[in-house]
Image (cartoon, helix red, strand yellow):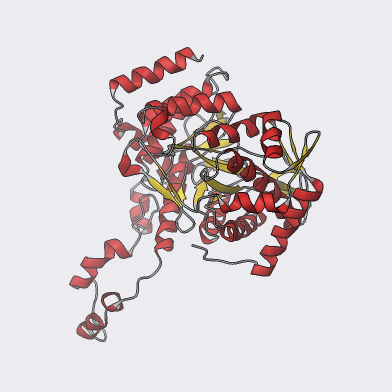
Amino acid sequence: MQRYQLLTQNEIEKIHETSLRIMEEVGIVFHYEPARDILKKGGAKVDGQTVYFPRDVVEQALKTVPSSFVLHGRNPAKNVELNTRDSVFVGPYGSPFVTDLDKGRRYSTLEDFNNIAKLCQMMDNIDVQSHIYCEACDIDANYRHLEMINSAIKYNEKPIMGSVLGYEASKKSIELAAIAHGGIEAIRDKPIMASIPCTLTPLSYDDKMAGGIIAYAEYSQAQLVNSLCIAGATTPVTLAGAIALQNAEILAGIVLAQLVNPGAPIVYSASGSNADMRAVSLAIGSPEDALFSLVNGQLAKFYNIPCRMSGALSDSKCADAQAGYESMMTLLMAQMGGGNFILHAAGIIETYNCVSFEKLMIDDEIIGMIKRIGKGVEVNEDTLAFDVIKEVGPQGSFITHEHTYENFREEFYIPVLSDRDTFTSWQEKGALTAEQRANKRWKKMLSEYEEPKLPAEVERDMRKYIEKNM
């Protein structure tokens, strides 16, 4: 649902037209020769490593992208539908560091990865598991992606994301995950994982990302064709110019996927933001990041494609007030802008570099609030409550009325972390800050975690596959 429209339809069309001109007149560099061959066969012009996209090639590819599809978990009750109306929320992705109040900031390990997987399994507000909750830095990089996919499937039942580190690594990731779903043939028309191939801004794709797009398209697995442009650094400083360039990059990846397999499931994924010009570094907790989300949402709706937006983002170094206000701003704008796949919905600090265990819990609270806002206000005879108002009358009390008891649990969001006690009661309970309460909550959740067991033969076959490909 598009709740907030920042630009007019005419302005969106101008961005689209500019993107098509960039694709046709400036071109996109593809370093991966098989990708250039596919694009050339599909009608694009290739000159060296630069690919030029005629308008009709782009427009035809956009017609074959599905506007909805189901992403399957190993527990069918956890399946989610990706469409252009609803929002699903996804955990943290890609950080090399983690932090918590007890151990502080450190390189993340497989143990940290597994603990975040367990927490995200238990967090009702997280709908899809990411593939890299954090980097398992203690595992050899040559097969780390397989270990992380194995853990993501072992410790949770929700749909997952997968590796996109080149054609072969992508194929192996898909084949490994398929073992838990009945084998590779069982998933060819059943998306069980989503990748996030990212452009090499400005206006290029490297070998790994282009290869990943091809592999995921061949197996009909979902992919978030993504660009993380940085206005003022890798794109024009003006947001309109940055978005036009970013859009051209994303459309080029979508064309490649659709030429490989028309109808391959795609999520339009734009995570651009601006540079902090004092240090010429990426800023993600900025109002400009929120503006990017709003416009990207409109572009995705223009193309009738599900849209990924970034969620609870912050440049803060800990789960402090800055992390709170930046995260609420970016996450709320992602939903209000019509985001359908909201990645990094919990835990991210330090400009994507770190996952905070405490912030996972704080963001879970924010998502709960935002989901409640997304439900809106239902207006009917019962909710208007005229008969109740008439019965209680002036100066009466509604607190003990049956109508209140019948409706308050559905009508009100009940916080799990926020403190609403009196000052005296808060003091008596230890005067804990939100961060301290979050610390207690994630520890309690891990102590109560129950593993959703994989069948023994599936776990055995997945381990054999990893050992074969180490």
Give the camera-side residue of 121 and 409.
Answer: 121
Check the image and report above or below for 29 versus 293.
Answer: above
Q: Position of residue 215 (x, y in %)?
A: 56, 31
Position of 271 compared to 92: left or right?
right
> Tag count in the figure?
0
Give the camera-side residue of 412 and 345.
Answer: 345
Check the image and report above or below for 183 versus 59.
Answer: above
Check the image and report above or below for 421 versus 345.
Answer: below
Q: Position of residue 122 (x, y in %)?
A: 35, 40
Check the image and report above or below for 173 versus 345.
Answer: above
Residue at 43% over, 48% down: 364
Q: Position of residue 233 (x, y in %)?
A: 77, 45
The part of the image, by quadrant, that contains residue 453 is: top left
Position of 289 compared to 357: left or right?
right
Q: Position of residue 264 (x, y in %)?
A: 52, 43
Position of 11 compared to 50: left or right?
left
Residue at 81% over, 33% down: 48
The part of the image, by quadrant, that contains residue 411 is: bottom left
Give the camera-side residue of 435 and 344.
Answer: 344
Asked whether the viewer can see residue 398, the reply is: yes
Asked whether the viewer can see residue 283, the reply is: no
